[in-house]
Image (cartoon, rainbow, N blue to C red):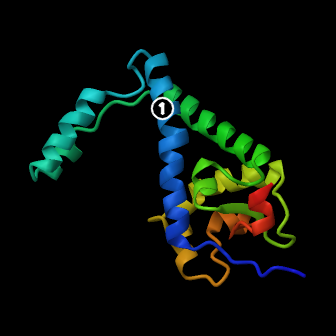
Amino acid sequence: MMQEIKYAGFWIRFIASFLDTLFLALPVAIVIYFLSDGNWFDLAQYQQNITYALNGNALKALEHQPHTSLKWEFLFEISVLIITVIFWEKQKGTTPGKKFVHIKIVDFKTHEDIDNKQAITRSFGYIVSFLPFLLGFLIVAFRKDKRGFHDLLAGTAVIYEREADAKE
């Protein structure tokens, strides 16, 4: 008996992404910041900008953008990409955040595990989904199949785990 596929919507995917930021990206960021000996970005300027913004002076915060090293930024982005692809491959389409909320990435047509090409295409598709104005992510809320632009590019979908999958 074939189980019905339930696509994961915008908010559950948002929560999973937030958790992945905490569990994957933040630890990588901390390591790279210390590896760069603080040269990745000007933390003091970020803190000053937060103070400006909290005091109602957002324009001053925007005027004083911190210096960022592209070399260290590139290392961070590539590291997060590699770690994410490894998770998708080893954990059958999940990351810690997706696993926590019981969703996973699958091939859209077969609903089977994604391959490395799909994982890499999907990751780079995030850039396209981000521009302009996060529209590639926001379309998830309006499509019946809940696919973002990155999913359309990679031929993937995000679905709720089936009972049998969750127990493996």
Q: Is residue 84 something one can see in this rendering? A: yes
Location of residue 75 in the rendering, given as x and y in whole percent from the top left corner: 57, 29
Residue occupying image coordinates x 69% and y 65%: 151
Query: Where is mark 1, residue-wise?
Result: 29
Task: State whether residue 97 is above or below residue 107.
Answer: above
Left or right: 83 with respect to 32? Answer: right
Residue occupying image coordinates x 75% and y 48%: 91
Task: State whether residue 66 is above or below residue 146.
Answer: above
Give the amino acid at mark 1: Ala
Judged from this view, the residue extending furthest toward the front is 167
Residue occupying image coordinates x 54% and y 57%: 16
Judged from this view, the residue extending furthest toward the right is 1
Location of residue 103 in the rendering, given as x and y in whole percent from the top left corner: 65, 63
Left or right: 49 with respect to 129? Answer: left
Left or right: 61 with respect to 23? Answer: left
Report which quarter residue 33 is drawn in: top left
Q: Is residue 154 something one can see in this rendering? A: no
Q: Quadrant of the N terminus?
A: bottom right
Location of residue 118 in the rendering, given as x and y in whole percent from the top left corner: 78, 55
Residue occupying image coordinates x 63% and y 68%: 149
Q: Quadrant of the C terminus?
A: bottom right
Location of residue 31 in the rendering, given as x and y in whole percent from the top left corner: 50, 24
